[in-house]
Amino acid sequence: MLSYAVQDLGKGVYISCRLDGSLFDLRRLTAKTMILQTHLQEILFADDCALVAYTEQDLQQMLDRFSEASKLFGLTASLGKTEVLYQPAPYSHSPTITIDDTLVNAENLKYIGSTICYDGSLDREINIKIGKASQALGRLRNRVLNEHNISLSTKLKA
């Protein structure tokens, strides 16, 4: 269904990569030889799909085609689970992406236990991880460390 939706659009993004093991050498990545350039329209992981585009208009066109194709195949997209995460250029506006006249923009996206922010910042993700660690330590303190019936050697193993 997804292939049918985006088969002749020509929208998406291009990524450059190397297959010789020099992934993090930026000088080699800018070289003209041994570089593989790939066109991506969708990224699939398990039962999730991410449509990628450079412009708001391209993404809106891809989503419209996706919506039409899903109806042709008798499927419906869960609008409650559908989100659009964008990375804005300086001085740009927030895009207004819709699916079936429903706005689906998001500033933060939670995916597989991680929070991805539109600006690429890790501050929110780090604060969430610190909060979870603090909660776990608090539970450990209440259940193990403050318990008088548990020996010191057992507490140190926890």
Image (spheres, helix red, strand yellow):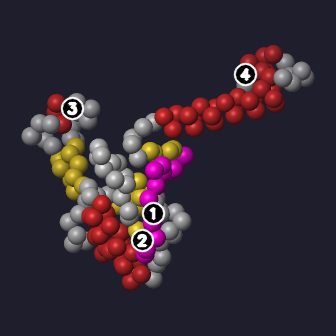
Q: Position of residue 131 (x, y in %)?
A: 63, 34
Spot the residue most to the top: 152
- Asked whether the beta carbons under mark 3 and mark 4 sit within 8 Å of each other, the answer is no
What SS does tag 2 mark? strand
Q: CA distance from mark 4 to mark 2?
A: 53 Å
Say whether residue 109 is magenta: yes
Comes first in the chain, label 4 or label 2: 2
**Hey, which quadrant is residue 6 in on the image?**
bottom left
Q: Nearer the viewer, residue 8 or 151?
A: 8
Comes first in the chain, label 1 or label 3: 3
Q: From the viewer's perspective, is 102 left or right of 27?
A: right
Q: Residue at x 39, y 42 (%)?
A: 119
- Asked whether the beta carbons under mark 2 and mark 1 sit within 8 Å of each other, the answer is yes
Q: Magenta segment range?
A: 100-113
Comes first in the chain, label 2 or label 1: 2
User: Which amino acid does the dot numbered 3 rest on?
Assistant: Leu
- Asked whether the beta carbons under mark 4 and mark 2 sit within 8 Å of each other, the answer is no
Q: From the viewer's perspective, is 143 left or right of 57?
A: right
Pointer 3: what residue?
26
Q: Residues within 10 Å of mark 2 (few under 14, many from 20)?
A: some
What SS does tag 3 mark? helix
In the displayed structure, 44 sits above or below 4; it is above
Pointer 1: what residue?
104
Q: CA distance from mark 3 to mark 4?
A: 44 Å
Q: Residues within 10 Å of mark 1 (few under 14, many from 20)?
A: some
In which quadrant will I find the C terminus?
top right
User: Which amino acid does the dot numbered 4 rest on?
Assistant: Lys
Comes first in the chain, label 4 or label 1: 1
